[in-house]
Image (spheres, helix red, strand yellow):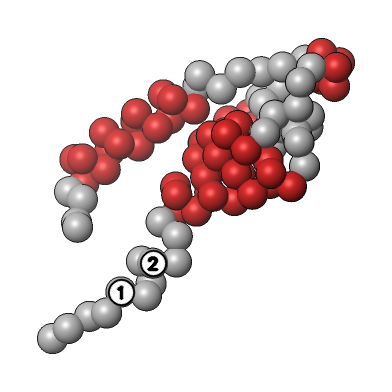
Amino acid sequence: MKISPKHFIWLAFLLILAAGCAPVVNINECVTDVPMGFGWGVLHGIIAPFTFIISLFKDDVAIYAVNNSGAWYDFGFLIGATIIFGGSGRGAKKRCN
């Protein structure tokens, strides 16, 4: 499936807009709060490219939750990042002539 440049721009705009909705938590409150699990890891993995760009300009934005549940959060983050970057299936497609 090929995405036209116009649709790609709209998709990028919507994803950046969604990344702006990521909550910022004070680190002192974060440590005492309930750890973020698999679902939050997936969400943070999906918005990671956008939050990385924002984190270059704002000190209070991070791409990875400090207070996470460990391996399940990491796995969710990896799944989310795979979703946004297209996974390995894109390079494994057969091309028939």
Q: Nearer the viewer, residue 42 or 58?
A: 42
Q: Residue furthest bottom?
A: 97
Image coordinates for residue 81, horizontal then vertical, percent = 53, 49
As drawn, 45 above or below 24: below
Q: Quadrant of residue 23?
A: top right
- Quarter of the image with the N terminus is bottom left
- Quarter of the image with the C terminus is bottom left
Q: Crowding at label 2, few (<14), some or many (≥20) Cα neighbours within 10 Å? A: few
Residue at image position (17%, 83%) is 96
Image coordinates for residue 75, horizontal then vertical, percent = 64, 49
Is 40 placed left or right of 36 in the picture? left
Circle 1: element type? loop
Image coordinates for residue 25, horizontal then vertical, percent = 72, 17
Distance from label 2 to label 1 (Cα)? Answer: 6 Å
Residue at the disc numbered 2: 89
Callout 2, which amino acid?
Gly
Circle 2: element type? loop
Q: Nearer the viewer, residue 35 or 19?
A: 35
Q: Nearer the viewer, residue 24 or 38?
A: 38
Callout 1, which amino acid?
Lys
Residue at image position (21%, 46%) is 5
Is 83 placed left or right of 40 in the picture? left
| Visible residue check, residue 63 | no
Q: Residue 93 — which label?
A: 1
* In contact (CB < 8 Å): disc 2 and disc 1: yes
